[in-house]
Image (tube, rainbow, N blue to C red):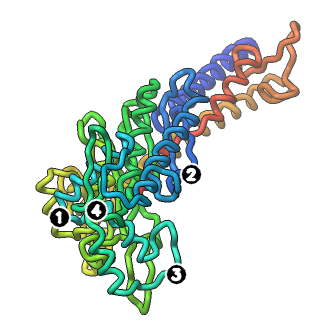
Amino acid sequence: MKSLWCSMKSRLLASLFVIACLCIQSAGSSPLYAQMSEFGGPTMGTSYSVKIFEMPSGLEEDAPFLVDQMLRQVNDQMSTYLENSEISRFNRSDSTEWFPVSRELAEVVSYSQTVSQKTGGAFDITVGPLVNAWNFGPDRGVRTVPDAELLAEIVESTGYDKLAVRLEPPALKKTVPELEIDLSAVAKGYAVDRVVALLNERGAKDVFVEIGGEVSVSGSKAGQWWKVGIQMPDAATNSVLIAHSLNVGGGNDRSMATSGDYRNFFEVDGKRYSHTIDPRTGMPIEHALASVTVVAETCMAADAWATALNVLGPSQALQIAQAEKMDVLLVARDDSQASGYQLSANGRPQQYRAAGEAGGGAGEQEVADEGNGRFTMFVVTAVAFAVLLFAMSVGVLFGQRSISGSCGGVNGTKNEDGSVSCSLCSSPSDACRELRDRMKNKPDNDMVDVS
């Protein structure tokens, strides 16, 4: 009888152990629990974040250094905060002759000029002096409303039509000596594209890169598309409006950028002044459009167009989005809606309109579903181990054995040959250590809040 019980007990424990291992293995093989390499740091007056799924061998130590090096190079070319950057030297120059620059800087300026032409100057990289006049630039002073005569004077000395660019040889040219350019509305997106391309060249195919809320991806995550959350345009909340999957296989759906007036603003005498300046008037935007999200093939395009459409306002923005066949989501303030916002969209983001206006974002449900999945997996694993431990206790009681120590513990039972094993593991303590190591794996959060 005792022999039969021992045999049954051994089979039961072995079966329970297999179930527990399968639970852990299932969690480990799930995309939500997959091995993910992450790093980040400060850049461009904000921060960057990089995620690499299945890091290529040999790139672990080099990736952070290579990305940092790339971002420093972009800063040296396009940062107005650095005195010796290419753009700062061009801004200080009073020459109206061709000014040699790097091809990278010329390409970004060239694309910016294209967006300026298509929007009638609503997007304008010469807007820097106006931004500074409103104290939203590098030299931020007291937030006051600038003199109207000063603004009129600056408007006269700015304008994308006073700037020329060529790619061969790369150079920029002013028509007025005081003209300056500022690429803050496009440089982050460009830098994101450069980092993704760099990592792809080094063998990392499944990549997520974010700088200051601008995102671009490549590949996927264990067969699942990368997801990007969009925050409701309200600085007082962190609720997710949507969770959009960037489908790289779609051809033009790999990058996302959002522009809004809900974080950087000031108030004087009860009037709100946004940091988004309309280059055509020299004044902060005053329309109801609070947030613009653009999904595009490149992050540079998404970044530039998000800013341009945010300047234009709801009606004009939607018209241009339709004409350019862009995927956009526009969120305007509207007290008549349950959520306080009215959503309009073109392309794929149209699917989020109803949920957003009802006050319940599609993204919130998706995040909840993923959280429930993780919790369910935890419960299944916990129950399996609880049953297993109960079976062990029954075996101890019926077998009239004393407990010498926990599995793999310091008091583990020693075999005749000096090795340590226990009734949980079918092999010596190495298997127990392996099991514990696998239990330590933590799930990765695949939601990023973009605002």
Q: Tell me the element at label 1.
A: loop
Residue at 39% x, 53% y: name it. Answer: 229
The residue to which callout 3 is attached is 142
The residue to which callout 2 is attached is 42
**Residue 16 in the image: above or below residue 134:** above
Work out how far the residue at label 2 is from the one at label 4, CA to CA, in angstroms: 26 Å
Q: Tell me the element at label 2.
A: strand
The residue to which callout 4 is attached is 124
Q: Amino acid at mark 3?
A: Val
Work out how far the residue at label 1 is from the one at label 4, CA to CA, in angstroms: 9 Å
Work out how far the residue at label 1 is from the one at label 2, CA to CA, in angstroms: 34 Å
* For the residues bearing labels 1 and 2, Cβ distance under 8 angstroms: no
The disc, 2 or 3, on the residue closer to the chain's N-terminal end is 2
Residue at 43% x, 72% y: name it. Answer: 132
**Residue 299 in the image: above or below residue 309:** above
* For the residues bearing labels 2 and 4, Cβ distance under 8 angstroms: no
Query: Where residue 33 appears, x then y in whole percent?
Result: 52, 36
The disc, 4 or 3, on the residue closer to the chain's N-terminal end is 4
Q: Amino acid at mark 4?
A: Asp
Q: Amino acid at mark 2?
A: Pro
Report the disc number at residue 120. 1
Work out how far the residue at label 4 is from the one at label 3, CA to CA, in angstroms: 25 Å
* For the residues bearing labels 1 and 4, Cβ distance under 8 angstroms: no
The disc, 2 or 4, on the residue closer to the chain's N-terminal end is 2
